Amino acid sequence: ETGVTQSPTHLIKTRGQQVTLRCSSQSGHNTVSWYQQALGQGPQFIFQYYREEKNGRGNFPPRFSGLQFPNYSSELNVNALELDDSALYLCASSLDTSPYGYTFGSGTRLTVV
Amino acid sequence: GNSVTQMEGPVTLSEEAFLTINCTYTATGYPSLFWYVQYPGEGLQLLLKATKADDKGSNKGFEATYRKETTSFHLEKGSVQVSDSAVYFCALSDGGNTGNQFYFGTGTSLTVIP
């Protein structure tokens, strides 16, 4: 059974640019959640997708958007990048929105300069 | 609202020492509580969980008891090893009002020296 795969692993972008981060969920999982982990902080919830529909959103501005594909992989898009967007972005997959059995990926380290 | 407060680090212990990492929470309902561990360069791994008051979660020698009266979920291990060096996160899930999201503490970095 494969785990959660995120790409790319590292990324450097310039302020004002747009970025797309990708996540392949674990086999059999139909729910994907995205988290932002700033340096030295705990992860913060961005949003969750369940069977291609958004199922909750955290306190992030609209320039953070996403989608989930029929194969349950997912993308996180961030427009108009700001320096404070520099963080580790974690994707987690699970079965049927249950908080038990989350599998986290290793994350994408985004640096905005 | 929901929040988690955990003991600030970093924590440095000698091998075989006793470990306690304090965690308290605020929640509007009846949350499930979790401890996650993050090794360098990796994502989060579930260490243990408890789903209701007085439940004890345990794994790999680590334990934590869900204490509703003190709103706490302290992590303990009787004898730490060098391989336990990592960052530990306490978290709660509120069960569905906002997409079953996790609320994480800020993390406690543990270093175990031989």
Image (spheres, coloured by chain):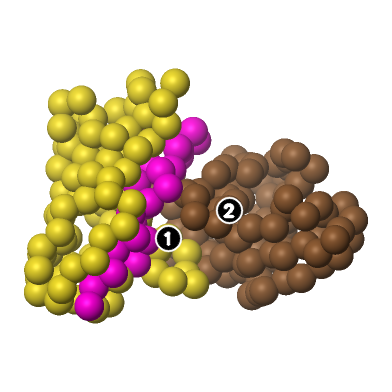
The chain carrying label 1 is A
Residue hosting label 2? B39
Where does the magenta region start and end?
Answer: A87-113
Instruction: Please tell me which residue lies in front, B23 or A90.
Output: A90
Q: Is residue A29 above or below residue B15?
A: above
CA neighbours of label 2 inside 10 A, class few (<14), some (14 to 19), many (20+) = some
Name which residue type carries label 2: Tyr
Q: Quadrant of the C terminus of chain B?
A: bottom right
Looking at the rendered structure, the kind of residue marked 1 is Pro
| Residue at mark 2: chain | B
Image height of B101 relative to B4, above or below: above
In this rendering, does residue A39 appear at all? yes
User: Element under label 2?
Assistant: loop
| Picture residue at 20% right of the left edge, 25% below the top | A71
Q: Which residue is mark 1?
A: A43
Chain given the colour yellow: A
Relative image position of residue B3 (x, y in whole percent):
49, 65
Q: Residue at x 18, y 37 (%)?
A: A68
